[in-house]
Image (cartoon, rainbow, N blue to C red):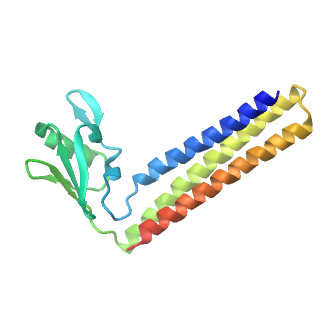
């Protein structure tokens, strides 16, 4: 029975870590005013009939804090890359010089920064809800294990462990929010 309880606790921790990883990926798409290759992580291009991530078909660099350059391995794909960036609806207006695609990242206004913080808060709340749902599912599973004859004290201790794991990940999520908020609001 202890194996089932340990498995349940490990599964809860693993699922909460996946939720945290998903949050970090989601937040990397929300720009903080500085140009970053991560901003284009979600861009995919139709590369000779197959959908390919931009980073697998071009070098993405940031020569300065306001510019992203994309040097495709195949120059014939420049117009397709531009279309893919526009279709990704990231708010960028790409241009090219025949050799590479250039994106000028405009400076953020105060109002836009506040809107971005609101977006971050939405993603943070989704992540916290996910952790709470994982906690609830784990507690339900522990109650089912309790019905199989495990003592109530052991189940209660396991539920407390699930709550401690949830608290740990909630703190990590709050730390990520604080970091991202200060990054966005920094001029």
Question: Could you tell me which quadrant the C terminus lies in?
Answer: bottom left
Q: Position of residue 136 (x, y in %)?
A: 72, 42
Q: Position of residue 157 (x, y in %)?
A: 84, 43
Foreground of the two, 41 or 59: 59
- Asked whether the viewer can see residue 186, the reply is yes
Q: Residue at x 25, y 52 (%)?
A: 61
- Asked whether the viewer can see residue 44, the reply is no
The number of discs equals 0
Q: Residue at x 39, y 52 (%)?
A: 29
Q: Quadrant of residue 83?
A: top left
**Horizontal placement of 156 versus 93: left or right?**
right
Q: Position of residue 151 (x, y in %)?
A: 92, 34
Question: Could you tell me which quadrant the N terminus lies in?
Answer: top right
**Horizontal placement of 8 versus 92: left or right?**
right
Foreground of the two, 94 or 163: 163
Q: Residue at x 23, y 45 (%)?
A: 59
Q: Residue at x 29, y 56 (%)?
A: 91
Examine the rendered structure and indicate whether residue 34 appears above or below residue 81: below
């Amino acid at each position: 029975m202890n194996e089932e309880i340990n498995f349940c606790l490990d599964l809860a921790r693993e699922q909460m870590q996946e939720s945290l990883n998903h949050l970090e990926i989601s937040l990397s798409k929300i720009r903080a005013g500085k140009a970053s290759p991560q901003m284009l992580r979600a861009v995919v291009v139709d590369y000779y009939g197959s959908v390919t991530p931009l980073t697998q078909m071009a070098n993405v660099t940031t020569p300065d804090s306001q510019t992203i350059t994309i040097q495709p391995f195949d120059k014939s794909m420049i117009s397709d890359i531009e279309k893919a960036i526009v279709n990704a609806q990231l708010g960028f207006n790409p241009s090219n010089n025949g050799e590479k695609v250039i994106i000028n990242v405009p400076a953020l206004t105060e109002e836009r920064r506040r809107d971005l913080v609101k977006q971050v808060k939405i993603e943070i709340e989704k992540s916290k809800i996910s952790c709470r749902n994982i906690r609830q599912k784990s507690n339900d599973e522990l109650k089912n294990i309790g019905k199989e004859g495990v003592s109530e004290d052991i189940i209660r201790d396991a539920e407390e462990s699930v709550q401690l794991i949830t608290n740990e990940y909630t703190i990590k999520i709050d730390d990520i929010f604080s970091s991202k908020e200060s990054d966005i609001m920094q001029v």
